[in-house]
Each structure stands twice: as C-alpha cells, then as structure tokens.
Image (spheres, rainbow, N blue to C red):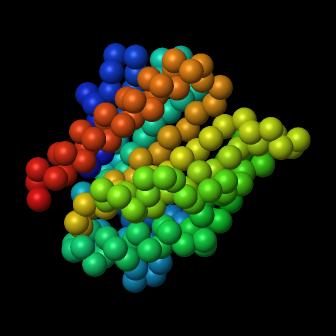
Amino acid sequence: MAGTLQAADFSAAWTQYAPGEARSVDPESCAYRPGGALTLITNGGGQAGPTMQLGQTGAFTSSLSLAFPDEAAAIDYISVVNSDAWATCRAQQFQQFQADNGSDSVVTVATRDEPSLHQNGFESYAQFNVSATDGTVQRYILSSFYRLGREVINENEEYAGLSDADFKLYTDTNYAALTAAYNRVSALA
C-alpha cells in the first residue's frame, strides 16, 4: 500500500472516484508472461490505489504498486513494460474499451520517451492518444513506471481539455502525490 498514490496525497480539489483494492495476478495483463515476474507476486503484493478525479473535470489519476520477491524480478517486469509488445497490447486494450463504449475513437502509442526517463527510478513511460477519426486528439493516457529496488509504482494519468490553471494543478498535484508514495517506499527500504 505504501507505493500507491493515496487519497490523502491529493489536495482538496480532488475527489475519490473509485476506491483502491488488492490486486491479484491477471493472466490478461499485457505484462503477464507464463513463469514471468508477475507470477512471483504473492497475495497482497499487488495493490491498486484509489482512482482520483480533479474536481468535475475529466482528469483522473490512478496507481498500482507491485512488490516483487527481489530486485531481479522487478527489473524483469520493467523489461516487459518497456517492450513494443506491451505498448501494442495496451493500445489494443484501450481501443477495445473505446469500442465497448460505443466510440469510434482511435488509440495510438504516441511516444515511449519523456525527458526525465531513466532518472530517479523512472524506468518506463508510454503516452497513448485517443483521437477522433479525423486525427484530432481527444484524450491523453500516460503510464509511468518507477522502480525502487524490488517495488514498482505504476502511475496512470488520463485527461483532456484542461484549462492552463487546471493542467498546472493536475500536474503539480500528481507530482506531489507520486513523491509522497516514493518517499513512503524509500522509508521502508
């Protein structure tokens, strides 16, 4: 639980959209490989933080914390999420969600790069764009992975159409919440 972004990490401008929960190994996960790192996570080793919403905007943040039995397994997991196969699978899952909800939007992998990647435990990143059929981006989905020893924090952000002030609040608060989770995990080491 220490590695998840918690409701108390967010300012009063945010509300809890959905509660956190324990997560078990899901063979449908894009990071699942038979005998791979995810299969080594024992009960309680996977925790989802609450999904938080910025006011009444369509901006959300969620997190997942995975405690592997050792650092080698965490490194193996990061290698999987850094793969093209993982990114393609996630884009397909997001695409299926669009179709299941009656949208003809197109989901693409926009980038796997970010200026601060490979610094301070930030080991993987993916930006997915949800676009109208004419190519206009409607939503952004960002997935960031931080490894601290044997623990991995996955932060997910989803937003669209924020004013400059709301976007600044969104990014600043996400950074503060991630820092709080990072510090909690570091204190346990």
Is residue 18 in view from this perspective? no
**Which quarter of the rendering shows the C terminus?**
bottom left
> Image quarter for residue 131?
top right
Give 93 or 174, whichever is nearer the viewer: 174
Q: Residue at x 19, y 45 (%)?
A: 183
Is residue 171 in view from this perspective? yes
User: In this rendering, is residue 13 above or below 9?
Assistant: above
| Percent coordinates x, y for residue 96 in the rendering | 70, 53
Q: In this view, does 184 lie to the left or right of 59?
A: left
Q: Residue at x 54, y 47 (%)?
A: 142
Q: In this view, does 16 lie to the left or right of 142?
A: left
User: In this rendering, is residue 105 above or below 126?
Assistant: above
Q: Which residue is drawn at 51% across and 64% down?
A: 29
| Percent coordinates x, y for residue 178 in the rendering | 32, 41
Q: Is residue 20 left or right of residue 62?
A: left
Toward the bottom, the furthest residue is 35
Q: Residue at x 41, y 47 (%)?
A: 155
Toward the front, the furthest residue is 115
